[in-house]
Image (cartoon, helix red, strand yellow):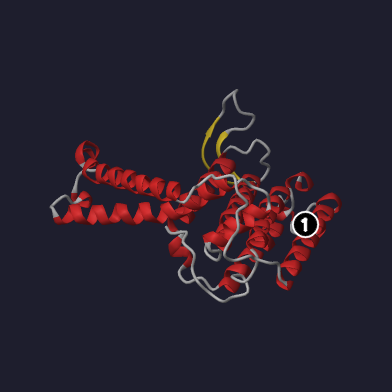
């Protein structure tokens, strides 16, 4: 996985960092209110549309580990909700039937209502996670620091965040470099058994990794101290970032869409009126 900036000249790259940060917050807030899969599908479609506009190559490969983890979590949610849905009314199939006083329904039956609810929860997670690359891959770290400073966030926090983002791909690349060098020395982890990995696989890899990171952190400390880091002076930046027309259009879209979502939730249960949806796709309280 890498979260390094990918250069480009797309409309997403040209947006102000605060606009992209607001977009991620907009997706998070909107997904919190939505409960039906039809409305969440529209939200995911908006995120994918901005993926398309950003034209990031191999975006799935860059976030492969995160997306695999989220997919596994979604499947787990669906299975858990399907089998343990106390509100379930429509059984799809039964593996076994176990009656227990601890649960209002017999265990072992998979319900449609649990499937839909678990799928909706998973779609929320997918929308939130999928919005992250739009910010991280299209925004240079210096631009993000400048944008955060305009929000009056302390510079030390901004510097810590930027350092963490810069060190993340460095840690990954250093880890694989050390692992490859140990393979040359006949220390191939992939060929070891499970118990052999527990006993002696990772020590020759993790130890040099920690030593390398400690050395780099010492070098970073010397570098920032030599530049009077933390001095009580008014900080200036080489490049000042200003809002453009596209930023105002984006803010207008996000505010309008969020207000429309709230109105829809109060009046008909989602972005799409529930009466337009089949019974199984309606929000839980309306379906009940």
Q: Report the number of numbered marks.
A: 1
Name the residue at the top extreme.
101
State whether residue 8 is above or below residue 267: below
Q: Please state, as top left, top right, bottom left or bottom right, where the C terminus lies in the image.
A: top right
Q: Nearer the viewer, residue 19 or 115?
A: 19
Rendered residue at 68%/57% (across/down) = 22
State whether residue 133 is above or below residue 234: below
- Label 1 crowding class (10 Å Cα cut-off): few <14, some 14-19, many 20+? some
Q: Where on the picture, by quarter, is residue 146?
A: bottom right
Residue 208 location (% of width, % of height): 25, 45
Rendered residue at 68%/42% (across/down) = 89
Name the residue at the right extreme.
267
Name the residue at the bottom extreme.
9
State whether residue 14 is above or below residue 170: below
Q: Is residue 83 visible?
A: yes
Residue 139 location (% of width, % of height): 56, 64
The answer to whether 49 appears left or right of 262 in the picture is left
Q: Please state, as top left, top right, bottom left or bottom right, where the N terminus lies in the image.
A: bottom left
Rendered residue at 50%/47% (across/down) = 229
The answer to whether 74 appears left or right of 252 in the picture is left
Q: Is residue 196 visible?
A: no
Q: Where on the picture, by quarter, is residue 144?
A: bottom right
Q: Where on the picture, by quarter, is residue 9?
A: bottom right
Indicate the secondary structure of the residue bearing disc 1: helix
Rendered residue at 31%/54% (across/down) = 174
Name the residue that disc number 1 marks.
258
Residue 205 location (% of width, % of height): 24, 46
Residue 113 location (% of width, % of height): 66, 46
């Amino acid at each position: 996985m890498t979260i390094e900036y990918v250069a480009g000249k797309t409309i997403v790259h040209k947006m102000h960092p605060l606009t992209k940060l607001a977009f991620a917050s907009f997706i998070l807030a909107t997904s919190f209110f939505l409960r039906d899969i039809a409305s969440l599908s529209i939200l995911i479609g908006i995120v994918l549309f901005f993926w398309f506009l950003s034209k990031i190559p191999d975006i799935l490969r860059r976030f492969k580990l995160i997306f695999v983890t989220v997919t596994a979590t979604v499947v787990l949610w669906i299975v858990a909700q399907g089998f343990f849905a106390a509100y379930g009314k429509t059984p799809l199939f039964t593996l076994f039937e176990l009656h227990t006083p601890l649960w209002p329904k017999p265990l072992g039956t998979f319900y449609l209502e649990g499937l839909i609810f678990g799928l909706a929860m998973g779609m929320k997670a997918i929308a939130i996670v999928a919005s992250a690359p739009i910010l991280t891959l299209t925004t240079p770290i210096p631009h993000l620091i400048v944008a955060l400073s305009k929000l009056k966030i302390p510079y030390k926090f901004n510097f810590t965040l930027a350092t963490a983002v810069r060190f993340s791909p460095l840690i990954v690349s250093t880890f694989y470099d050390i692992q490859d060098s140990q393979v040359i020395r006949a220390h191939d982890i992939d060929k070891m058994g499970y118990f052999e990995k527990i006993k002696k696989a990772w020590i020759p890899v993790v130890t040099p990794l920690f030593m390398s990171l400690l050395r780099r952190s010492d070098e970073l400390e010397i570098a920032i101290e030599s530049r009077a880091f933390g001095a009580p002076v008014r900080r200036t930046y080489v490049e000042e970032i200003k809002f453009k027309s596209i930023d105002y259009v984006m803010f207008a879209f996000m505010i309008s869409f969020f207000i429309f979502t709230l109105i829809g939730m109060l009046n008909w249960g989602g972005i799409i009126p529930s009466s337009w949806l089949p019974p199984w796709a309606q929000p839980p309280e309306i379906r009940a």
